[in-house]
Amino acid sequence: MDMTSGTLGDKILKCTVPLACTGILQQLFNAADIAVVGQFSGKAAMAAVGSNSPIIGLLVNLFVGISLGSNVIIAKSIGQKDKKTVSRAVHSSIIVALIGGLIMMTIGELAASGVISVLGVPREVFSLAEKYLRIYLLGMPFILLYNFESAIFRSCGNTKTPLIALCISGVTNVLLNLFFVVVLNMSVDGVATATVISNVISSVILFVSLLKTDLVIGVKLKKLRIDRRILLKILKIGIPAGIQGMIFSFANIVIQSAVNSLGTTVMAASSAAFNLEIFAYYVMNSYGQTCTTFVGQNYGAGNAERCKKSLKLCLIQCAAATCLCCLIILALGKTLLGIFNSDAEVIEVGFIRLCYIFFAYIFSFAQETLSGYLRGFGVSFIPALCSVIGICGVRLLWVFMVFNADPSFSTIMQVYPISLGATAVAILIITLIIRPSKRYLSGVKSTAEQRT
């Protein structure tokens, strides 16, 4: 997709829809884990799988953030028509993903028991939660490889190939879930094993696609090495985004610990609601990623007006799509929650969470899109700092001060709109102050003219 010329609105939609579907389908397949164990293994197994979500997010988000660095560097180089840099960035990204995945797998296995303990998981759930986590961690190299490969495809506007790969692996995941749990009478170990196998499949499909493509993002085995100069550029953008994701996940771990203190019913309800609310989040997040890619390519081409127009259209489309998604989920909320667990109390508490979270998304869609806009220019530290202070800082203070004084479910839920609102306002103000389309485009334009 040529993002540097032609109409923008239809191209943004064409790029975002497969990206959003990828995230939603990924979550649907993850939700299948919880739904299968919830229906066939009981509430404790369901709570065990759900309690691992913040931990897994903490491990994955660092390198998912770094993959954004790859996305920006490759997209910018495509806009500049610098094929040499594109190739170096692609091959470096593949190696970084594999090495990073092995490191995180090793660290996670060593720390698994201690992390579960910190979460305050109840005794009847502890062993199941640890078993699920240890098996899941075995697939970490393939999880990170898939995310980096997706970033590579996304940088040139191809969001369909990662979606196809996910569909194939996801269907396999659901079938294996049912086989392991229903036929073989396994529990959390069955759904975890199915998840690992499906992650292997999706990452291998994308890797083979990169080997076979004739596009500039194609991979050659003999070129698989890390270019130090490119790596530093990727890390400069990716590390702040990764740290932001890690600290964000850490704040969610603290919140999960508070939720766990309210009992197994609340744990199960929160887990079920999370697997619904995340669909709307992926819609917002996909527009943030699309904005990063469109701005990155037009930044490389030196087109300031097109960068600003990309932001405007992404904000408008993101607001409309997020509202529609939230309304649909709320309309079907209690029915959908019943898929995970038929307990009436679990359904009621889960619906309360949905209401709080979707109100918070009024602010979140702006925060996601503006962060994506800034990262398209390579400005990664500022949105990361805003999120660390506005989201993580507020949530940690809320848990340790407000929640400790009034330990109820509604109290812990109130922190979401407060923290997301503060962050969205901060990022908006900073974007208006630094005006990246003016500050960063002049140097790139002169470079592009020299290249011409």
Image: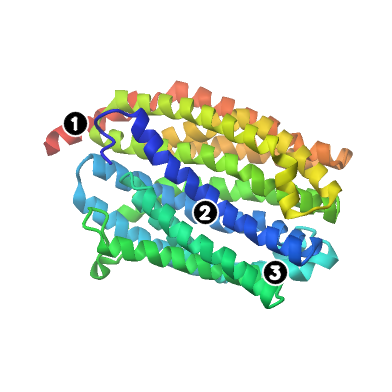
Looking at marks 2 and 3 on the same chain, the residue that comes earlier in the sequence is marked by 2
Give the Cα distance between marks 2 and 1. Answer: 34 Å
Q: Where is residue 246 in the image (x, y as percent from the top left)?
A: 58, 51
Residue occupying the point 80% across, 58% down: 120
Q: Residue furthest bottom?
A: 184
The N terminus is located in which quarter? top left
Residue furthest right as drawn: 406
Give the mark toward the camera: 2 or 3.
3
Res 375 quadrant in image? top left
Label 2 – label 3 distance at C-alpha: 25 Å
Residue 300, given in percent of the width and then of the height, sits at: 26, 37
Secondary element type, mark 2: helix
Which one is in front, 51 or 316? 316
- Which residue is at 35% across, 51% downward? 153
Q: Give the answer, above or below, for where 376 lies relative to 308.
A: below
Left or right position of 265 against 212: right
Q: Nearer the viewer, mark 2 or mark 1?
A: 2
The residue tagged 1 is: 446
Per the rendering, the mark at residue 62 is 2
**Within 10 Å of the Cα at label 1, are there few (<14), some (14-19), or many (20+) other Cα atoms?**
few
Q: Can residue 378 be seen in this view?
A: no
- Kindly identify the amino acid type of the residue bearing the numbered disc 1: Ser
The first of marks 2 and 1 along the sequence is 2
What amino acid type should be assigned to the residue bearing mark 3?
Val
State the SS at label 3: helix
User: Can residue 120 be seen?
Assistant: yes
Contact check, label 2 and label 1, Cβ < 8 Å: no
Circle nearer the N terminus (3, 1):
3
Task: Determine which residue is flagged by label 3.
Answer: 188
Q: In the drawing, does residue 399 fall left or right of residue 11?
A: right
Q: How crowded is mark 2: few (under 14 residues within 10 Å), some or many (20 or more)?
A: many
